[in-house]
Amino acid sequence: MKKVIDIKLTTAGFEKLKEEQRMLTEKRPGVVKRLTTAREQGDLSENAGYHAAREELGYVDSRLRTLKLLIRSADVVEATSSEFVTFGCTVTVDDGESTRNFIIVSGLEADPMQGKMSDSSPIGSALIGKKVGNNVEIMVPDGKVSYKILKIAK
């Protein structure tokens, strides 16, 4: 079967999507029950509980469709080398003041506050393909930063 979209995910990112899908699937019957109960109360035009439940059901159903597509289309990719920075690896860098760890992930998994950098972000794309000992200068919104790559781990 041909994939509609091509998505790279780490194993952790793929499992997180599957967990969200499981949680929403379990939550859906309760939302449907609330919607049914609110509908039975009569006048729907002024029934805030009905409108809230209908909106929530719409969100749950929409998100479940999105998750199904993402899970079906995902390619789980793990770091292939600890010699070069690749998708899925953890990179330890030094900016001259402190040491930081970045995990190179897809845009879907990115969370800069947790050190998960998108492979298409300025930092992620600048680090990919580099090896231990390389110095990298990167233009970020706050200006130019320089990192020295100290360690690469799968």
Image (cartoon, rainbow, N blue to C red):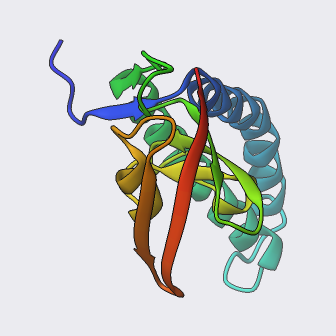
In the figure, is residue 36 to the left or right of 130? Answer: right
Residue at the extreme top: 1
| Residue 13 image position (x, y, % from top left) | 59, 32
Between 107 and 51, the residue placed more toward the observer is 107
Residue 92 versus residue 132: which sits nearer the camera? 132
Q: Which quadrant holds residue 98?
A: bottom right
Q: Quadrant of residue 51?
A: bottom right
Would you place residue 78 above or below residue 44 in this image?
above
Image location (x, y in percent) of residue 142: 54, 87
Is residue 131 toward the left or the right of residue 51 in the image?
Answer: left
Check the image and report above or below for 83 versus 42.
above
| Point 52% across, 74% down: residue | 145
Q: Is residue 126 left or right of residue 23?
A: left
Relative to 152, is 123 above or below?
Answer: below
Residue 12 picture quarter = top right
**Residue 29 placed where, x, y %?**
76, 35
> What residue is at 43 percent from the left and 58 percent from the top?
136
Identify the residue at image location x=82%, y=52%.
Answer: 34
Quick one: quadrant of the C terminus?
top right
Between residue 49 and residue 105, name the one nearer to us: 105
Q: Residue at x 18, y 12 (%)?
A: 1
- Asked if residue 119 is positioned above or below residue 15 in the image, the reply reads below
User: From this viewpoint, which residue is outermost toward the left?
Assistant: 2
**Image spot of residue 5 (x, y percent):** 24, 36
